[in-house]
Image (tube, grey):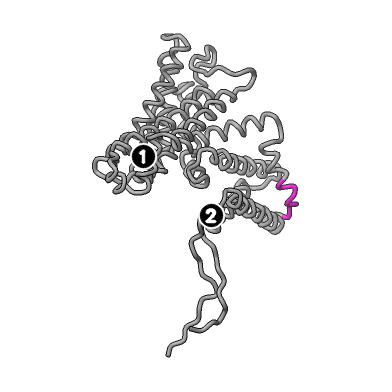
Amino acid sequence: MNKTRTPLFHVSKRGALPWYRTWAIRGTALLLALVLCGIITSIVTGQDPLAVYAAIWSGSFGTKRKIWVLLQNISMLLCVSLAVTPAFRMRCWNLGGEGQALIGALTSAACMILLAGKLPNWAVILCMIVSSLLAGALWAGIPAFFKARWNTNETLFTLMMNYVATQLVAYYCVVWESPKGSGQIGIINPNTQIGWFPQIGSQKYLLNILIVAVVCVLMYVYLNYSKHGYEIAVVGESERTARYVGIKVDRVIIRTMLLSGAVCGLAGLLLVGGTNHTLTPTIIDGRGFTAVMVSWLAKFNPIWMILTSFLLVFLGRGAGEIATKFGLNQSFGDILTGVILFCIIGSEFFINYQIKLTRRGKEQ
């Protein structure tokens, strides 16, 4: 008779946890990450870990200007994250947020350059808004049509569209270069400020922040309390079930991707018209890819995305402050950021699964 030993432990699927237990697990993971970062800092650099943590805090909250820049960066990352979330809820993996936002930025810059002096400022801004939303929607609508019609791989399609958008922006940066021979576009309309969004008081970034806050609330309501949001959820659970209950899946895919692209185009518009007033191939700064992590960590919940956006931006700015203050390589700050993110992402395992110990050595 063969004798077998039971394993020391086994992993089982955990039921849904209350939200406070979920965030308690994540908070514990964050504390563990800080301890690990302190140990790594002491061993590798000999620096005081507490001084390094203070530098991370100072990178975001050291001055009033740093706080406003932090809020601006959070709002831009949040905007792109909100854009890709409807598609992700539908299990349609739109990885083209970078390109869709770039196309929105390109059309906004085109309006500022080509319509300056031909239309009043309010009309230029209106053209920027309409064109950027439509351009972003079109850029997402192309892979959506092929997905709905021929079931192509939307992940690869949207990724490839990013490269096309980047090269288009690079081309027009040469066409519209200022000064000539520089290969880049300087500040657009610096004297007339045509196409520049108005400031609220003395705060340059406040309008962008308020716009993204409104979009966040609207997206939450749309996904959780509208008929379209319900259809997105059903298609995400099972396309076969969605078709069985009468939902036109192809229409939902195209409609949702158009929405996703339009909000990405809005992000490009806000960067050109409200913040940078110029155009470069790197103006989105990788937010289209970081947004995937933001959306996933928040479980596709627009409200929780505010926290995950804050976390990633806070860590990124802290990494830069460490490199500046201690004369360390930027990569060291990125290492600490990676350790913290690894612990936070790893905590999702303990949220979704539980480990149960068994009697060691029990024979069967």
In this rendering, is residue 2 above or below 26? Answer: below
Name of the residue lying farthest toward the front: 245
Instruction: Look at the numbered disc 1 and give the secondary structure of its residue.
Output: helix
Tell me which corner region of the image, top left, top right, bottom left or bottom right, holds residue 38: bottom right
Three-letter amino acid code of the residue under disc 1: Glu
Instruction: Look at the numbered disc 2 and give the secondary structure of its residue.
Output: helix
Residue drawn at 50 percent across, 22 percent down: 273
Three-letter amino acid code of the residue under disc 2: Glu
Q: Nearer the viewer, residue 12 or 136?
A: 12
Tell me which corner region of the image, top left, top right, bottom left or bottom right, holds residue 105: top left
Where's the N terminus, which quadrant?
Answer: bottom left
Q: Earlier in the sequence, mark 2 or mark 1?
A: 1
Q: Disc 1 marks which residue?
A: 231
The answer to whether residue 100 is magenta is: no
Direction from residue 11 to residue 93 in the image, left or right: left
Q: Is residue 186 visible?
A: no
Q: Disc 2 marks which residue?
A: 348
Query: Where residue 208 appears, x then y in whole percent?
Result: 55, 26
In this rendering, is residue 357 above or below 211? Answer: below
The answer to whether residue 47 is magenta is: yes
Per the rendered image, the range of residues in magenta is: 46-53
In this rendering, is residue 199 above or below 106? Answer: above
Query: Where residue 116 appears, x then y in whole percent?
Result: 44, 13
Name of the residue lying farthest toward the left: 150
Q: Residues within 10 Å of mark 1 (few under 14, many from 20)?
A: some
